[in-house]
Amino acid sequence: MMYIHDLPGEIGVITPVSLRALPQLRKKNRLHIVALGDVGMTMLLGLRLLGGDVLEYCGIYDINEKNSERLEMEMNQISYPGGEGGLPPVKIVAEADLFDCDVFVFCAAKGVPALDTVGDVRMAQLAANRELVRHFAAMAAKAAYKGLICIVSDPVDPLCKVFLQTSGLQAVQVQGYGLGVMNGRARYYAERNPEFKQYLTEGRVFGPHGEDLVVANSVAHYDDDVSRRLTDLVVHANLAVRGLGYKPYIAPALSSAALSVLLTLRGDRHYSSLWFGNAEKGAFLGLCNRFTPYGAEYEDPPLPDALYERIRTAYVRLCELS
């Protein structure tokens, strides 16, 4: 049996960077979002409705000032009859003030693939989004930022690596939020097909938000054939929505981003990607984890050989991206 903690050794890393630390967070956090397109706007809605216990306010920054002004008005007009509910207010912030916060969420993107794009559309965005990430990572470094960085834009895991290496922040400060929706999609199919029902109680997802995703019907009772069939459905679920003529952004914005970020701040189990490697090489890998008083804690059960090999392959391929 092998374990997740064995992965860095596969690329020759003997002493991985420790995740036994925490970003500087508060009981109620100041959260800033960059870019309010379809994903950012939908995520903001989820944070506004559900984040009152852990958010002081949501700050928004978009290159389109009218979009920011519109969302400041509309989001703050979402209200219970008497103003109860503790909904965090939405504020417009200037670019210069983006890192005067506790949680920074990156939703910016260049060149969103058209609906008829063939193949894994996430990877088509890497080259364009890399430079955007470097811009904001340099700002974080200059600000000596101590809070949490949440990368939502695709491809999540390679962009996390770019941010980490450009900013020089601690590895535990950067997390990628793309895997939550893959769990949501796996549950969707498992609820509709008895062949996959074991996933609902024992299943897990690992790896990137893309073609190398690993869905396990169960860790303790892993069935490679069933798991691979479920993986194929989950990986191509976004293409099914695109085939209907729509961009698949609602579930990712809420499952991967809003819900997962809030679970992170509460110290609850969620799906996000953590850094496995040293200062020179490694990759962000998605898995179930949580913040504890002792740092980031991830699930690390003994893995069947076939499951470990799938996760190892995904990890090594992520290490090769830059």
Image (cartoon, helix red, strand yellow):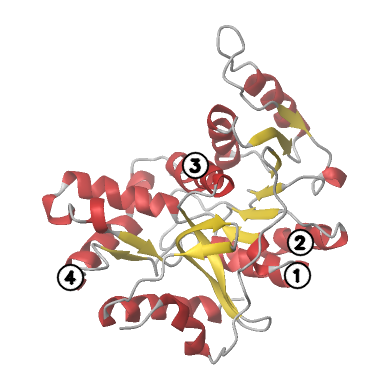
Question: Which type of secondary structure does the marked residue at label 1 adopt?
Answer: helix
Tell me the CA gap for discs 1 and 4. 40 Å
Pointer 2: what residue? 137
Earlier sequence position, callout 2 versus callout 3: 2
Specify the amino acid type for callout 4. Answer: Asp
Mark 2 residue type: Ala
Question: Quick check: 150 above or below 48?
Answer: below
Residue 166 numbered mark, or none = 1
Separation of disc 4 and disc 3 at Cα? 30 Å
Q: Are marks 2 and 3 in contact (CB under 8 Å)?
A: no
Q: Contact, CB < 8 Å: mark 3 with mark 1?
A: no
Q: Is residue 100 above or below residue 196?
A: above
Quarter of the image where one finds residue 296: bottom right
* Residue to which mark 4 is pinned: 225
Alpha carbon distance from label 2 to label 1: 6 Å
Task: Give the mark nearest the N terminus, 1 or 4.
Answer: 1
205 relative to 11, above or below: above
